[in-house]
Image: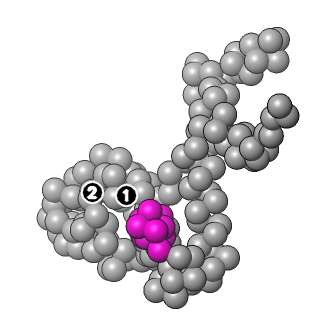
Amino acid sequence: MNALFNLRSVPSRANPSIPIDPFADPAPPSLYNQIVRSIGDNAADKLIADFGGRRLYILMAPGPDDQVTKSIGLVAALAMARVFGGDRLVIPLGSDQERRRARIIAMRADHLSIPLIARQLRCTERYVYKVLALERITSTPAPVAEHFKRGIISRRP
């Protein structure tokens, strides 16, 4: 109990007045997901097509002549400035991995076989198994996961 209390009372490095939450999600969302959340799928795809792999400065107040505004439009540029304004971002090269993971999960939910999924998405079967295992771990509640890990306990009559 003391260790838990001490963890909660330790301030974070970014803001000393806010304590660290030991139960917070340890994996932050990817930059691609943050961009999509701020400006939408279509504008994010356009931004990646124009600036993917480049380091890009996001203005605090973009104007109509700004390169980001010319690429994705003023409304999306303003929304992006609200989230990332004043930051230099390395724009991701693509969202293929995120989309492929979502398609693997959807195809498996449609009861397609692992080899068929791998063949259609042009990836290895091992990668399909890995994605499905990660999805199972993150979406399955702990007691059910423990049940599957241990297997069915046989009861003697």
Check if mark 1's residue and mark 2's residue have beta carbons within 8 Å: yes
Residue 12 visible in the shown view: no
In the rendered image, residue 77, in percent from the top left (x then y), is placed at 24, 59
User: Residue, x 31% and y 72% (percent of image)?
Assistant: 45
Q: What residue type is labelled 1?
A: Ile
User: On the image, which quarter does residue 9 sit in?
Assistant: top right
Residue 95 visible in the shown view: yes
In the rendered image, residue 119, in percent from the top left (x then y), is placed at 52, 88
In the rendered image, residue 153, in percent from the top left (x then y), is placed at 79, 39
The numbered dot on residue 39 is 2
Q: Is the magenta stretch mostly helix, strand or loop?
A: helix
Of 6 and 91, the residue lying toward us: 6
Characterize the local packing of mark 2: few (<14), some (14-19) or many (20 or more) Cα atoms within 10 angstroms: many
Query: Quarter holding the C terminus?
Result: top right
Of 93 and 12, the residue lying toward us: 93
Tag 1, which secondary structure? helix
Segment colored magenta: 102-112
User: Residue, x 31% and y 66% (percent of image)?
Assistant: 44
- Position of residue 149 in the picture relative to residue 49 (left or right): right
**Residue ID for mark 1:** 35
Of 99 and 71, the residue lying toward us: 99
**CA distance for labels 1 and 2:** 6 Å
Query: Quarter holding the N terminus?
Result: top right
Characterize the local packing of mark 1: few (<14), some (14-19) or many (20 or more) Cα atoms within 10 angstroms: many
User: Residue, x 67% and y 42% (percent of image)?
Assistant: 145
The total number of labels drawn is 2
Tag 2, which secondary structure? helix
Confirm whether the magenta stretch covers residue 110. yes
85 vs 89: above or below: above
Of 41 and 81, the residue lying toward us: 41
